[in-house]
Amino acid sequence: MSFGPKAAQRLANKVVLITGASSGIGEATAREFASAANGNISLILAARREDKLTTLKADLIQQYPEIKVLSRVLDVSKTSSILSFVKGLPEDFADVSVLVNNAGKALGRSEVGQLKAEDVSEMLDTNVLGLITLTNALLPHFRAKNRGDIVNVGSIAGREAYPGGSIYCASKAAIRAFTGALRKETINSRIRVLEVDPGAVLTEFSVVRNYGDKAAADKVYEDTEPLGPEDIAEAIVFGVTRNLKVVIAETLIFPTHQAGAGVLHRGSLGQ
Ligand SMILES: NC(=O)c1ccc[n+]([C@@H]2O[C@H](COP(=O)([O-])OP(=O)(O)OC[C@H]3O[C@@H](n4cnc5c(N)ncnc54)[C@H](OP(=O)(O)O)[C@@H]3O)[C@@H](O)[C@H]2O)c1
C-alpha cells in the first residue's frame, strides 16, 4: 500500500525497532515501513533466526538503496539480554523512535491440567516478559526525547479467552493491561501507545502453535479467507503515520468471515 507523501515525511529519518521481524507480521511491517518511507528510514530487525533477518535486510536494501537496516539476533524471552541489546545499538540506530513489540507465539492447545510447563514459560516469557522488559528498557529514552511510538501487537485472544488457549489468551490479556496502563502513564508526554489486535492471520503462527505440523496448521484456515500479514502491517504503519496529536489507541482487525475468537464462518462468503 502507498501511504503518500505526508506519511513519508512523518517517517523520514525515524529509527524503527521491530521484534519478530523474521516472518509474518513483523516482516510485513518492516516492508510496509520501508515502502511508506520510500526507504528514508532506519529499521532494526530483531528475532532469533539470523538467516531470515539477513535475507530480509538484503531484500530491503536492494529495493530501497538508501534505507539503513540493522539486523540483530534477539531472543526476547531471554530478558536478561534485553538491556545490553538496547545499550549495544550502534550510534546510527540508538535513537529509536518507534518500537513495534510484535514477537510472540502460541504453543499447543492443551487445556489446564494438561499444560506443558515449558510451553507455559515460553509463551509468558516471550509474549509478556519480553515485551515488558524491552519497553521498560526503551521508555527512559522516549521520555528524554519526549516522543516515541510504542505499538504492541496483541490479539483477539487478549479480549476473548477460549478453551485450549488459557496461557496464550492470558499472555495477550496481560499485554492489553500493560498497554492500557502505559498509555495512561504517558499522557503527560508526546509518547503514543498503540495496540493492534489481529484476528486470524496466515503466517507461521499456526505452524509454531502446532509444533511444526504444517497439515494441522493448514486445517486452522481451511475454507476461510484469513488476513495476510500485510493487512496488519498496514494498520501498524497507518497508526504510526497519523498526525502527532492522534493516537489510534486500539485496533481490532478481523478477516470478513470472523467475528470473535473462534467465531469463524467456513465456506463461501458469496460474490
Ligand atoms: N497469526 C495470527 O493469526 C495472529 C493473530 C493475533 C495475534 N498474532 C500475534 O502477532 C505476532 C506475530 O505473529 P505472526 O502471526 O507474524 O507469527 P510468526 O510468523 O510465527 O512470527 C512470529 C515472529 O516472532 C518471532 N519470535 C518468536 N519467538 C521469539 C523470541 N523468543 N524472541 C524474538 N522473536 C521471537 C519469530 O522469529 P524467530 O522464530 O526467528 O525468533 C517470528 O519472527 C505475535 O505476537 C502473535 O501472537 C498473530
Image: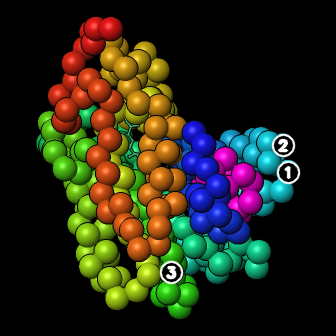
Q: Residues within 10 Å of mark 2 (few under 14, many from 20)?
A: few
Query: Which is nearer the N-term, disc 3 or disc 1?
Result: 1
The residue at which mark 2 appears reads as 62
Quadrant of the rendering where the C terminus is positioned:
top left
Q: Is residue 43 magenta?
A: yes
The residue under label 2 is which amino acid type?
Gln
Tell me which residue sits at (50%, 45%) in the image.
233
**Left or right of 101, for residue 91:** right
**Left or right of 234, for residue 16:** right
Q: Which residues are magenta?
A: 33-47
Question: Residue 147 got which mark?
Answer: 3
Tell me which residue sits at (32%, 41%) in the image.
253
Q: Is residue 67 magenta?
A: no
Does the CB distance between marks 2 and 1 fall below 8 Å? yes
**Left or right of 69, for residue 229:** left
The residue under label 3 is which amino acid type?
Arg
